[in-house]
Image (cartoon, rainbow, N blue to C red):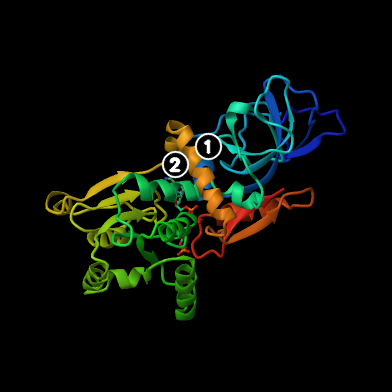
Amino acid sequence: RGGLNPSSTQSSGTEIRAGNLLHNHSVSPSLPSNSILIRTLATPINPADINQIQGVYPSKPPFSSLLGTPTPSAVGGNEGCFEVVSIGSSVKGLQKGDWVIMRSTGFGTWRTHALATADDVLKIENKEGLTPLQVGTVSVNPCTAYRMLKDFIPLEPGKDWFIQNGANSGVGRAAIQLGKQWNLNSINVIRERPSASETESLKQELLDLGATKVITDGELQSKGFSSQIKEWTASTKGDLKLGLNCVGGPPTLAMTKTLSQGGHLVSYGAMSKQPLSLPTGLLIFKDLHFSGFWVSRWSDQHPEEKRRTVEDILQMTREGKFKDIPVKELRWDWGTEEAVLKEAVQGTLEGFRDGKGVLMY
Ligand code: NDP
């Protein structure tokens, strides 16, 4: 549970359990001059974190023997909010008490403390009015939604539309809210819930967030629904230019077919674990464009843009224009049972969940 240098003798250390092993880790007050000591405040459990543990994700966190495990180990988790506890003598621009997030994914955020360098982190310039949960979940889901709405095809405010599946996901909810802020019309596709009243209540929840329309997978795939969509887009004299794909598989084909001539489908998730197969005519005659988006790559390639995107979203959050995602908070402390953590991690890829698991420290 520590994340610093292991020591089996120091009684003031942080206890870490790895499998059946118990280690003590000292949180040393003397730091290398270019390092910062950070304390974790909140870290979400995102689907990609689980894929990474399963070994099916393209990037791996660095494995090392620093944690004193018998074989090299890595810490899970890719985003979070941290408080600076102390800084090395040559570190500039940071001070004790600042809140920071990771500049890139892959740091390993599920730990109580960590040693980092100033380059690893992005300082939250104004933490007033923000919670650790809001800061700890800003850099993956909201940034993904923000960039996908901005960077692929221009949408004319008030007129044009985007359509997305997985609309109740963290990314989906962010896209709905940003769409509302930027006056973009949205069609939001959700999976039908076990009962009609649950489906209606989820639809209402997303409408309250700022969705223009919310439909189910079944409605999208029903006969004649395309004329309904045409009616909606005609009513604003706009086009359905952008699709955001969280899911993959056959329902995504139905969504893709609704796009206007020259439209763009951006895929960022594959929650159904099914491939997307497309009739070639969509590319030839309808001139649809297909892209993928990966926030890790974007963050590494555009560090300054990332800082601006994060600041913009946090400003909307402060102003009450960007609401928290539903979460299931899990307190990470001495009493936290391993089974509870395991369940939270394992449940992340299951469907129909009430909220994303977030570890609070
Ligand atoms: P959340 O945990 O917030 O939401 C999960 C979503 O997936 C829900 O909408 C859920 O719908 C849906 N879902 C779960 N199982 C299935 C299934 N079998 N078929 C269809 N839909 C399903 O997720 P996030 O917003 O954090 O992430 C969503 C996806 O986006 C993930 O695949 C994640 O890896 C990816 N992602 C990619 C990024 C990138 O840079 N490319 C960045 C951020 C996320 P329901 O409630 O109906 O179960």
The percent coordinates of residue 357 (x first, y second) are 60, 55
| Quarter occupied by residue 328 | bottom right
Characterize the local packing of mark 1: few (<14), some (14-19) or many (20 or more) Cα atoms within 10 angstroms.
Answer: many
Q: Is residue 306 visible?
A: yes
Residue 148: give x, y in percent of width and height.
Answer: 38, 48
Tell me which amino acid carries mark 2: Val
Q: Looking at the image, is 258 positioned above or below residue 67?
A: below
| Callout 1 touching callout 2 (CB < 8 Å) | yes
Above or below: residue 165 compared with residue 215:
above
Q: Which residue was labeled with disc 2? A: 295
Residue nearest the observer in this picture, 255 or 91: 91
* Farthest right residue in view: 11
Residue 193: which numbered mark, if any?
Answer: none
- Please indicate, yes or no, whether residue 194 appears anywhere in the rendered image: no
Within 10 Å of disc 2 (Cα), the crowding (few <14, some 14-19, many 20+) is many
Q: Quadrant of residue 37?
A: top right
**Ligand 1 contact, mark 2 (Cβ < 8 Å):** yes
What residue does disc 1 label? 105
Please give the name of the residue rendered at 56% of the width and 54% of the height, measured from the top-left corner: 317
Q: Residue at point 28% right, 69% down?
A: 221
Residue 178 located left or right of residue 157: right
Q: Looking at the image, which is closer to me, 216 or 118?
A: 118
Q: Say whether residue 93 is left or right of residue 305.
A: right
What type is the residue that disc 1 sits on? Thr
Residue at the spot 27% in from the left edge and 67% down from the top edge: 236
Disc 2, SS: helix
